[in-house]
Amino acid sequence: MKPVNRRTGSEGGNPAASTKGKKTGDTKRTCVLRLFVAGDGVNSYLARINLEKLLACLPATECDVTVIDVLEDPQAAFKHGVTVTPMLQVLEPEPGRTIYGNLSDASVVLAALRPGGTR
């Protein structure tokens, strides 16, 4: 499986597409996420489902999500320093965070998606 790029609410999406430069009056926040999974294992499956549910609860946030299956693309895991799956990298908003596990603790994920990444 190749990396899958998805914008919330629609399939597809260009990972290089920038969400910056929007009109000043636009209140949508943006986030860029990278989820590393290992096939369809239980925790990888749960991480996908939990992330999808959390993003559905954030209608004012537009997210670029890239899902990378490390069984299909081990080089990506090596390149990004992945030692454990599932692993979510929050690239934006800054300062960025890494969250390990099936993302069942919604408060941790939601805190990472806030500007400044604090609880």
Image: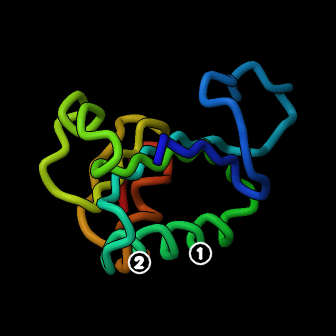
Q: Nearer the viewer, residue 7 or 27?
A: 7
> In the orientation shown, which residue stands out farthest toward the left?
83
Q: Give the labeled residue for mark 1.
A: 53
Q: Is there any visible trace of residue 107 in the rendered image?
A: no
Determine whether 93 is above or below 23 in the image: below
- Please state which amino acid type lies under the numbered disc 1: Lys
Residue 22 location, quadrant: top right
Q: Give the labeled residue for mark 2.
A: 46
Position in image of residue 83 (x %, y %): 12, 49
Position in image of residue 59 (x %, y %): 75, 62
At x 70% / y 55%, what residue is drawn? 8
Q: For the image shown, how many numbered marks are present on the structure?
A: 2
Q: Is there any visible trace of residue 75 in the rendered image?
A: yes
Position of 66 with respect to 76 (left or right) is right
For label 2, the SS is helix
Q: Determine crowd level at label 1: few under 14, some 14-19, many 20+ residues with C-alpha closer than 10 A.
A: few
Q: Nearer the viewer, residue 33 or 22?
A: 33
Residue 99 location, quadrant: bottom left
**Which badge, 1 or 2, is on the more N-terminal residue?**
2
At x 61% / y 64%, what residue is drawn? 55
- Please state which amino acid type lies under the numbered disc 2: Leu
